[in-house]
Structure formats: structure tokens, C-alpha cells
Amino acid sequence: MARRAYELGVNYYDTARMYGDSEEKLGAALHDVRDDVILATKCHLRTAREARVLLKQSLRKLRTNVVDLVQLHGMGDLFNDEAAVKQVMGPDGAFEALKEARRMGQVHFLGISGHRPKLLVKAIDTGEFDQILVSMNLFTRYPYEELLSHAAKNDVGVVIMKPFGGLGFIADTPEFHRLFGTSLAEKARRALRFLLAHDVATIVPGLSSVEETELAVHVGESFKGLTAEEEQLYRLKEDLLTGQCRECTLCLPCPELIDIPGVLRLIYLAETFGLKDWAGKSYRGLPFKAQDCTRCGVCEPRCPYGLPIIAMLQHAEDAFKLPGAA
């Protein structure tokens, strides 16, 4: 599959030591065309000693003397935790070891991955990172609100992961079919086209077959912009985030163990994309619901967007409660 991707012109390959034997497979598939491709791997460990060992293993597995990009894996989500940031980026932290490797010519660029755009903005502001890897898809649009423009302004490359978020976990409904179509190929095509309409460097879809690889490449090569029908369908020009939770999770932990971002995401999907039946069923399966809220008010001062979280939780409870339920 990797070799077929190369034959079709794909030149960016994303991997990590923690992805099983992914590095070994890419090393075997691409070692004789090494100079034609960009290899990006990750470091999920925190200390300098661990990072050095990890990088040594990655270079060996990938059959190369240099990795084009190494990302601090998932650590963009730590930028509200001063102690964790200090540990990772301090004198004995993993990032110092990666910078040392860059000085030695073992690494060309350094990046960071994460799922919380607000915190990735903080990471960019350190001036330390060349690239970010962030999840974005039709249902998770938060990166384009602030992160994409901030990255462009600071000359930081953006790679998108999880482009198919929502395709696997949302049950088929008429509303879902309207957005994505019915066949798996059509769903994938529409999801990729939505992302290609944004200012990103590339997308790592997480492909699992030669056929999927060929489909993704065809979508990329044929993309000339969204049609007017697609723009209307995806509501691309609308601000769908006004008054909505961005899932930064800074409101947590909740004393009553309510997954506040999770609850608010369900009401967002229900009301914005017409997925009320699916969202309601998912909500009623949660172990801790909005009805457990004691209105203690701990969450609201933490929210960087000033959302009325307590009222939003109550709205979700009212919307998802089964008729006749106490």
C-alpha cells in the first residue's frame, strides 16, 4: 500500500514507534526511494533519555540516517499544564533531546500533535515548532476558527488527522446520508474534499488498503475547489461555532464526573446536523448525565469562551430526555 502510494505521487508518510510495526513497514517499502519522500514520526515519551532511545530505534526501523519531522505526540494537549510543559521542554525533557538531534542532523524539523486547538495556539506561540498535527473534519471544525490562521501567520505547517471523524461512530440516518452519501467511498470522498477546501498542508487519512489509497489520491488530484452545492451542503460559510463548546476540556474535571465537552458535543451534533435521535441515544448511555449537575459553578470560570455551561447542560438534558421520563 505504501509503495503504491509512492507510485501515485504521495510523498508524506506519517508513523510512530507506538503504531506497532508501522515504522518497519515504511522502512521496508520506501528505503530505496528515501530521498523522494518525507518521513514523519513521533515521540510520545517525556524525558531526554527516553527520546534519544526512541529516536535511535525509529531511525533503525525506518532504515534511514535522518527523519524529516519528529512530533511531540499528543503533547499539544498539555499546554494548560505548566508542570508537564516544563518537564517535556525543559533541560532534561524530550524536546531538548530532539533539538539536539536536529543540531546533529538526525532530524530536520520538529512538530507537535494534539486535539485541542486552543492549546496548540499556545504551543505555536513558543516559537519552537515547525509543524502541528491536529484532528479536523466536518463535525470537528474548531481548528479553522483560530488555529489555521494563527499557524499560517507564524509559518507553521498544518497536517490534518482524523479526517473521517463521524463516519464510523454516527449511525446511518437520512440526515447523515444527505451530508455524506451512502457508500463508504462517497463518504470518504466528501470528507476529504471538505478538508481540502481549507488552508492545510496535507491530510493523513489513515488508509488501510491499496483501493483506499487510490481513492484518496484521486480525490486530491482532481480537487479544484468545492462546488456551490457542496458549500451550501457543508454550510461552509456559516459560523457554526457561535455559542458552542470547542472541546478544549479546560472546564474539566467536573466534581460530578460529567463529561461536559462530551455532552455539549452531542447537543451540537443534534441541533446543527439534525442527528437528534442518534445523539439522544448516545447521551442516555452516558454514566453521568447533565441531570447530575449540582450547579456548583466550578466549570464556567474555566471556560475561555465564557459559555453558560450550566444552562447548556440543562438544555441538553431537556432535549434528550425521553418523553415521560422523570
Image (tube, helix red, strand yellow):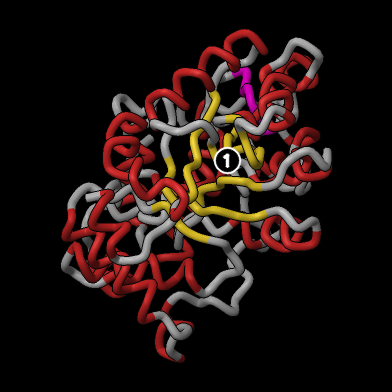
**Is residue 295 visible in the rendered structure shown here?**
no
**Is residue 311 visible in the rendered structure shown here?**
yes
Residue closer to the observer: 252 or 180: 180
Residue 250, percent from left and from top: 69, 33
Residue at image coords 40%, 89%: 229
Report the amino acid beneath label 1.
Answer: Leu
Residue at image coords 22%, 59%: 212
Residue closer to the observer: 76 or 306: 76
Q: Is residue 273 left or right of residue 81?
A: left
Crowding at dot 1, Cα within 10 Å, few <14 / some 14-19 / many 20+, comes out as: many
Residue at image coords 28%, 36%: 28
Relative to 274, does residue 204 appear above or below in the rendering? above
Residue 92, percent from left and from top: 75, 10
Q: Residue furthest front?
A: 32
Q: Which residues are magenta?
A: 250-255
Residue at image coords 45%, 33%: 64
252 in the magenta segment: yes
Q: Is residue 2 left or right of residue 321?
A: left
135 in the magenta segment: no
Residue 23, percent from left and from top: 36, 31
Quadrant containing the C terminus is: top left
> How many badges with numbers are in the image?
1
Query: What residue would you read off at disc 1?
Result: 69
Residue 267, percent from left and from top: 48, 51
Kindly report the secondary structure that dominates the magenta region of the rendered protein. Answer: loop
